[in-house]
Image: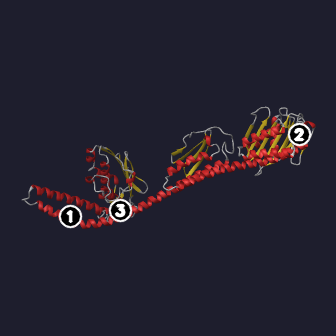
Amino acid sequence: MTAERQDKPYLSAEFSALTTRIMRLADQGLLRADFLRQVSAILLDFSGCDAVSIRLVERGRYYGSDKNSTAEESFIYDVSPIDEARLRFADLIADSGGASGFEALCYAILLGKAEGAASGITERGSFLLNETATPAEFSVEYLGSRHKLSVPTANGQVSMVLLPFPLHESGLGLLVLRSTRQDYFSASDIEFFEGIAQMLGMAIVHRRAHVALRERVKELTCLYGIAKLVGRPNISLDEILKSTVKLLKPAWLYPEVTAARIVLDGNSYVTDDFRVGFASLKADMEIRGVPRGFVEVAYLDERPVLDEGPFLREERSLIDAIARELALITERREADEEKSRLQEQLRHADRLATIGQLAAGVAHELNEPLGSILGFAQLAKKGSELSEQVQQDIDRIVAASLHAREVVKKLMLFAREAPMKMNRLNMNRTIEDGLYFLESRCAKAGIEIVKEFDPDIPDITADPSQLYQVLVNLVVNAVQAMPSGGKIIIRTEHDADNAILAIEDTGTGIEREMLSKIFIPFFTTKDVNEGTGLGLAVVHGIVSSHGGKISVESKVGTGTRFEVSFPLSDSTGKNSQGDPKDGES
């Protein structure tokens, strides 16, 4: 070490103090750019050099930082994919003059193989150039070819040492110290800074582990929060999604500028400040192979480039995991809802069967006494000496008996005790005939009937009187739902297997909690004098006995839509369920 350099503190105590400062800096878990800025300032101050450069090849990226002593904010930081760095290296080899010659040499040490007339190349592969006033010549091997590389003076810096060091996972780093003074670096300097470079490599790995652990804790906290939400009893999918979107912000590297949204089936769940920001990550939600929505996280302001734009590689994995988890939650919830729906259908069918058996017995037991009451009442009316009051009382008996007999008929129809006369028929013509008797009633009520018939609808095999009964019950229900008038749309259409009748009104609608009960016998929301509660139960029974299906959609204040489907007839006069053309079901 020359007399000029005696003030350099390269004793073991100073080495220990310097490495301790670097490792403590790594313990803070700073982002890569912040760590390189601060460690460069430490090395610049300690070494007395004029510039410190650090180059890293790590995790498929090429990182470069430069800091010099000429200005307080002189730090430059750059990130590029490794493939892009290789292309840039190839370009620099072709033009190695000036600053590009220095950068090409850095690339050559990290990406290729450099050999040359340096003042010294140590056992650890460090390069020393103590007089770069005259360009140093290097031979660079890259992709099987050799190229000549000239490194001249850069910004008056005539002494330079390049110190490679290993990183984890096959990564590699390079520490470069430069000075404007000639012969600035001695052999002991090189040895000292080779040790510092090795320690810097360990500090970079340590810093990365700290950051990865911190981010992993945030990611697991987010996923655990989602799991806790799902575990809460009686929480709806809507509530899960609303709460999950609030968990996303703290899980990202810059929560203060993070906004998030979840979109499922066109419904958006967003943080209060969400907008299209500087950069975003998005992951699709696929349920049974069908895209149904996505999870998106955005940074509202610009942030430094990391693994994927300003986002970490782990954050890409996290948003993918969240999207998969939400898709699974949605799929399980929908499966549970479908299971509950099917179980309710089974319970409903069981109730209908039980009531049907009861109704059949009641109908048979009531038929005979009703016939006697009606017959004797009608005979009594023929008496010549009856007072007016008695006549009125007998009329009431007859009217009540007729009403009771009508209820019994409906009970028998519901219980499928009444015989069915199956014929091949055209649904359009049957409905047109039935509407003839309903149009005047609708007109008096201020209700417009709109007919939208499918002209090519195929024939079905059905009992015409029962199909008429279905039409009457559904239209009468629609009329009663529109006391101030409105519109009824009667539409027919067909698909490959079924003829479909849809009746839609603009009435008061049915509350959601009532929809599951409307086909239960004797259930009604109408006044006592307006119905028996058997109309829709009879419709359900008729449709079921024909092998068809009935569904309902309703919105309070908007209206109700009933859709009935019947199997099409085949060429033999049977429907697709195999019912006979004539006979009883």
Structural distance between the alpha carbons of marks 1 and 3: 27 Å
Residue sitting at x 74%, y 38%:
77
Say which label, 1 or 2, has the lower sequence index.
2
Q: Secondary structure at mark 1?
A: helix
- Towards the viewer: 7 or 245: 7
Structural distance between the alpha carbons of marks 1 and 2: 121 Å
* Marking on residue 273: none
Residue 515 lies, with reference to residue 148, above or below; the image says below
- Towards the viewer: 513 or 434: 513
Camera-side mark, 1 or 3: 1
The residue under label 2 is: 185
Residue 348 lies, with reference to residue 36, above or below; the image says below
Residue 97 lies, with reference to residue 327, above or below; the image says above
Residue sitting at x 76%, y 51%:
168
Question: What's the residue type where badge 2 is placed?
Answer: Phe
Camera-side mark, 3 or 2: 2
- Outermost residue to the front: 13
Find residue 81 and report its horizontal and vertical position in percent. Answer: 72, 44
Find residue 190 and report its horizontal and vertical position in percent. Answer: 87, 43
- Towards the viewer: 108 or 400: 400
Residue sitting at x 82%, y 39%:
46
Say which label, 3 or 2, has the lower sequence index.
2
Is 492 left, or right, of 105 in this rendering?
Answer: left
Question: Few, some or many C-alpha atoms within 10 Å of disc 1 (few <14, some 14-19, many ≥20)?
Answer: some
Question: Few, some or many C-alpha atoms within 10 Å of disc 3 (few <14, some 14-19, many ≥20)?
Answer: some
The residue under label 1 is: 370
Question: What's the residue type where badge 3 is placed?
Answer: Ser
3 and 2 marks in contact (CB < 8 Å): no
The residue under label 3 is: 545
Q: Secondary structure at mark 3?
A: helix
Residue sitting at x 17%, y 57%:
396
